Image (spheres, rainbow, N blue to C red):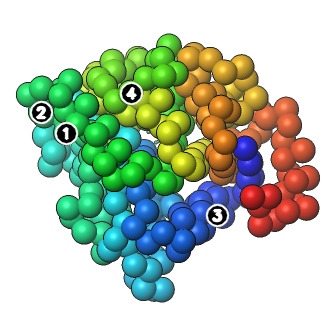
């Protein structure tokens, strides 16, 4: 595990973008697992800049998104499909057939979830998984008490997550209570994982993920079992880490990463 603490959100986003570029430079047709939410927005902005200003090529990249609300039409402004197109896909040269998101309006969720897992496997698995973290420590929509071996399935959201995500919906508009999400087990199969977190509201969840016991009460803590995971944090998100000084000391000695 590596913990990289940045002074600003912009610096954190650039460090995460460098990790994405490293993966794609060594494997241009890499499979990326992507997340939504405000945390990866700076990373996506930087990927767009790399494409527009440096001609970075995304034409062979394959993507699988982590999760999607159930019941929202694909073109609903708050669907994760809309989010990804608006904030990334519409601005880079990714091939539309290489984009995969959970289908939230399918008639048969169980079959869909199984086929999503199969599609990931058929592409050779995820090379690099991008994650954010919920304030209750969830990854994807794997809410507290999700099995740490879980696979892609429907989850009921907690009230805390519904409240957290209400800010994206119009006043009076209902936040969906169900989502399709890759499972913790699915996520742990990615070859490499990066988790991005900024702001004080994430400090508790981040501390639980990195230093807490491995527990389904904080599904991000399962990342402690993964052999190649990097946390990109700003100072506020890192503020509750007991080992913060140790991580900073390592970073000062090895600014380009130990790996
Ligand atoms: C949602 C998503 C997660 C995301 C989390 C945090 O619950 N399913 O993948 O990590 O929100 O979002 P934000 O980055 O906006 O804080």
First along the sequence among labels 2 and 3: 3
Which mark sits nearer the N-terminus, 4 or 2? 2
Beta carbon of the mark 4 residue lies under 8 A of ligand 1: no
Q: Residue at x 12, y 33 (%)?
A: 106
Counting residues from the N terminus, which is met first, the one under dot 4 or under dot 1? Answer: 1
Callout 2 touching callout 3 (CB < 8 Å): no
Q: Quadrant of residue 166?
A: top left
| Residue 243, image x, y percentages | 86, 37
* Residue 32 rendering spot, x and y as whole percentages: 43, 55
Q: Are marks 4 and 1 in contact (CB under 8 Å)?
A: no
Left of 23 or right of it: where is 155? left
Q: Nearer the viewer, residue 120 or 181?
A: 120
Question: Which labelled disc corresponds to residue 151?
Answer: 4
Q: Residues within 10 Å of mark 4 (few under 14, many from 20)?
A: some
Residue 74 position, x and y percent, is 16, 45
Q: CA distance from mark 4 to mark 3?
A: 29 Å
Give the residue drawn at x 60%, y 63%. Answer: 19
Which secondary structure lies at badge 2?
loop
Above or below residue 145? Residue 33 is below
Q: Is residue 53 left or right of residue 10?
A: left
Question: Of the residues tagged 4 and 2, which is closer to the observer?
Answer: 4
Please tell me the numbered disc located at residue 15.
Answer: 3
Residue tagged 2? 106
In the image, which is nearer the foreground, mark 2 or mark 3?
2
Q: Is residue 82 left or right of residue 213?
A: left
Residue linked to disc 1: 103
Q: On the rendered image, what quadrant is the C terminus found in?
A: bottom right
Q: Nearer the viewer, mark 4 or mark 3?
A: 4
Please tell me whether mark 3 sits on a helix, a strand or a loop: helix
Q: 10 Å neighbourhood of mark 1: few (<14), some, or many (≥20)?
A: many
């Amino acid at each position: 595990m590596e913990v990289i603490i940045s002074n600003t959100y912009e610096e954190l986003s650039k460090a995460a973008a460098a990790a994405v570029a490293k993966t794609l430079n060594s494997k241009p047709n890499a499979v990326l697992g992507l997340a939504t939410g405000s945390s990866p927005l700076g990373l996506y902005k930087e990927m767009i800049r790399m494409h527009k200003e440096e001609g970075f090529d995304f034409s062979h990249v394959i993507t699988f998104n982590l999760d999607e609300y159930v019941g929202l039409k694909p073109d609903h402004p708050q669907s994760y499909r809309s989010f990804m197109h608006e904030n990334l896909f519409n601005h880079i040269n990714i091939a539309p057939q290489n984009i995969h998101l959970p289908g939230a309006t399918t008639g048969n969720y169980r079959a869909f979830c199984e086929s999503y897992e199969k599609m990931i496997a058929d592409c050779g698995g995820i090379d690099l998984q991008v994650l954010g973290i919920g304030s209750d420590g969830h990854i994807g929509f794997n809410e507290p008490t999700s099995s740490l071996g879980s696979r892609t399935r429907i989850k009921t959201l907690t009230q805390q997550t519904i409240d957290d995500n209400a800010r994206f919906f119009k006043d009076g508009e209902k936040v969906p209570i169900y989502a399709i999400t890759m499972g913790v087990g699915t996520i742990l199969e990615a070859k490499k994982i990066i988790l991005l977190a900024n702001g004080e509201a994430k400090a508790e969840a981040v501390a639980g993920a990195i230093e807490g016991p491995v527990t389904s009460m904080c599904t991000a803590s399962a990342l402690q079992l993964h052999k190649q995971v990097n946390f990109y944090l700003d100072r506020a998100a890192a503020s509750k880490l007991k080992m913060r000084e140790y991580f900073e000391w390592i970073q000062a000695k090895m600014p380009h990463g130990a790996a």
